[in-house]
Image: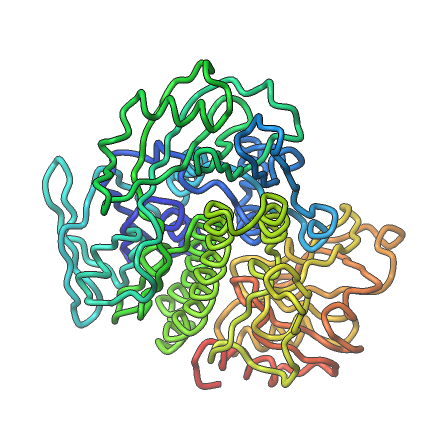
Amino acid sequence: MEVLIVGGGPVGLSTAIELSRHGISTLLVEKHEGTSIFPKARLVTTRTMEIFRAWGIQEEVERAGMPREEFLAVGVGSSLTADDFVRSAAALRRDAPQSPTYMFLCSQDLLEVILRRLAESRPGTEVRYGAAMTGFRATPDGVEAVVSEASGETLVRCSYLVAADGSRSGIREELGIATEGPPPLGHMISIMFEADLGFLPPERRAALSFLTDPPCAVEAVDHRRRWMVQTGYEPEEGGSPDDFTEDVCLAAVRAAVGVPDLPVSILGVLPWLQQAKVAASFRSGRVFLAGDAAHVATPQGGFGMNCGIQDAHNLAWKLAAVLRGAAGPALLDTYEPERRPVGARTVDESLHNAFITFQMMEGRLSMREAIEQQAGRRSSEGLVLGFHYDSAAVVPDGTPAPAPEDPYRTYVPTARPGHRAPHVWLSSPYGPVSTLDLLGPCFTLLATADAGWPAAASEASSRAGVPVTAVEVTTTDASTGPVPVPAAEGQAAGPFTSPTWAKEYGLEAGGAVLVRPDGHVGWRCHGGPASPDALATALATILARTP
């Protein structure tokens, strides 16, 4: 077994899934007996939905979640039924064209079931719930860990360990890795309840509503009967989770809805800390931190789970390349410089969102001012799609990064090395295809046609010892072209056409971009002719190998 993953939440499960796609054997252990029974996270960002699309579970997640058009909105008011309640929906028309999919709401308890089913179906993946890692130590060639279950203890030997064990990560503490950030922002209580709120008109349906009388938030868990009220308590004033008896919870729910005699069933009560912190390091030797073990965001914005899944997406292909001998060990040194700045920025932006809520609750913002700011911050495609990497695993081309006026909200598509490869619809005999749909778990060369790049990719791939899929995009209408034939080895079936693709990718005649297995551009050649030497050198640089 090559990689041990500790933690069976969305990040741990995603790590196992992605490693399996690269042919790496894993053991995932989770101390709880099953997947989460509490909703916890709900927002799945556009970038995470793109990853789910690549895994073939986008439609399953959408069936399990809530309708975008109704619930991708935020509201504020005294209560859900108060006259002062106002609502603002996400900018679907503006943001949706930037991807073949779009952000979605699917509560974590339902999402984990989908991810677990997929992980357990993958070859080389073993998932054990009710199994806790109770100790580990570094060895000259890997990690030894003790896994404890009801049946006894097992000594597990692995090459690498991924700690996806949450915000109170015991692995992080054992390694002595400090966290940086402010003190806890609040001691919170989530009250999950069941009630028929079908009487609320569409203009009062929102993913999240901030209410002031009393101060709390209401979250939609499904689009039928499950909801959550989030409120808080003050330990310095003698408050504790024990204060939230069933009667107290019922009163809190009815006050939030604004219906004193509302029939309600309390399904669960969960205490938690609202925090914003980042680990000082994401790695110690052969142990890597991912998800909340590495960075904890406030829930404001719904970024935490998604940022962790992107950690897994970034780390998995690098571990696989090193384990298979395709990359030098130094490739793993790029995980922290690529992911830590993204994690830190994500935490900071979630903190900004939380401060808007605090100002409203304290009366420093009117409800109208609060909804304008909250609604504006619900559109975050600049953050979730526009982040980029600067590391030794990226070959710069000397071009500047886009500098939008609002980098949180505004995403500017670019194929500059380090950025996510932009989505562009291509025509094919099979119908429209996104450029993102052509990217698999190996390197992909997207190239202008008739410049010789498929042959160059084949030669460079052979020299580098890693597969490279070559995709040519023409400007000719594929719908009137010849019937497609099976692609040669290392090439995608086509033809694919777009009159604008090259311009959107910053390419001239003969240009090409090399996309890494995580969907980020690793190298760009603005114009031809095709050069197997340049491509082989780029691969060697990205993989930390001598060309």
- Front residue (pair 279, 150): 279
Q: Does 75 sit above or below residue 423?
A: above
Q: Does 41 sit above or below residue 476?
A: above
Q: Is residue 447 left or right of residue 302?
A: right
Which residue lies at the image location 14% right of the left edge and 63% below the top edge? 137
Q: Position of residue 547 (x, y in %)?
A: 49, 85
Q: Position of residue 344 (x, y in %)?
A: 43, 66
Q: Does 415 sit above or below residue 182?
A: below
Question: Farthest left residue?
Answer: 152
Question: Farthest front residue?
Answer: 363
- Front residue (pair 270, 12): 270
Which residue lies at the image location 47% right of the left edge and 80% below the top edge? 392
- Front residue (pair 388, 530): 388
Which residue lies at the image location 29% right of the left edge and 39% below the top edge? 271
Residue 488 seen anywhere in this rendered image of the structure: yes
Residue 301 seen anywhere in this rendered image of the structure: no
Residue 177 quadrant: bottom left
Question: Farthest right residue?
Answer: 480
Which residue lies at the image location 66% right of the left edge and 28% below the top edge? 202
Q: Position of residue 12 (x, y in %)?
A: 35, 50
Q: Is residue 376 left or right of residue 259?
A: right
The image quadrant where one finds the N terminus is: bottom left
Q: Position of residue 321 (x, y in %)?
A: 41, 68
Tally the marks: 0
Residue 205 quadrant: top right
Q: How is the image coloured?
A: rainbow
